[in-house]
Amino acid sequence: MRGQTKKIQKKHKKGQKGFTMIELILVMTVLGILAVMALPTFYDLTSNAKTSARDGIIGGVKGGINMFRSNALSNGTTPVVPADLDTIAAYPTTCGNGVTPAGSAPCFGNVLQDTVTSNYWVKSAALTYTWAPTVGAAAAMTCTYDTVTGNFTCI
């Protein structure tokens, strides 16, 4: 036991403390490989978040239409479904915050308590909304509202 302690003390006396250059290079290489493996996951998270936000808004709009219908049926009032999902008259109009771009307004105000102010949603025609996270994106989706049946369908 004493012999081992003396060897360790001798090693430290010669100034041989710390890691060798090879050990540092190996650790950096392993960390680099792990980082490269994790990057696709981080890029995919933003796409998944945008898609989930879109699906949440679609579900909220459908729920708002059904709430409007149930209130009208229980109160005996007409129309049974909303005539429009918001008060936007001009289109195409981005469902923005009313400041940028000019002329934009919140969407789905007639069926949602908290209106949509995402620049990804555009009212592209009467009763038609398009979701596109970027201009010309392949993942764009168009939703149409039918005022007779109250269906909000997206393709």
Image (spheres, grey):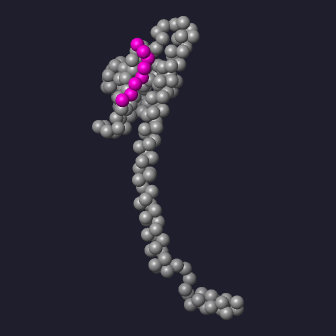
Magenta run includes residue 23: no
Quarter of image, res 129: top left
The total number of labels drawn is: 0
Residue 109 position, x and y percent, is 46, 22
**Which residue is depicted at the point 62% across and 88% down?**
8
**Which residue is depicted at the point 42% across and 48% down?**
44
Q: Inspect this view and state whether residue 14 appears.
A: yes
The residue closer to the viewer here, 118 or 22, is 22
Residue 47 position, x and y percent, is 41, 43
As displayed, is residue 118 above or below residue 70?
Answer: below
The N terminus, quarter of image: bottom right
Residue 80 position, x and y percent, is 48, 11
Give the magenta part as a residue range. 148-155
Name the magenta segment's main secondary structure.
loop
The residue closer to the viewer here, 93 or 4, is 4
As displayed, is residue 27 above or below residue 49?
Answer: below
As displayed, is residue 40 above or below residue 66?
Answer: below
Left or right for 33, reference 14: left
**Which residue is depicted at the point 32% across and 25% down?**
124
Quarter of image, res 84: top left
The C terminus, quarter of image: top left
The residue closer to the viewer here, 101 or 126, is 126
**Which residue is depicted at the point 48% across and 20% down?**
65
Quarter of image, res 91: top left
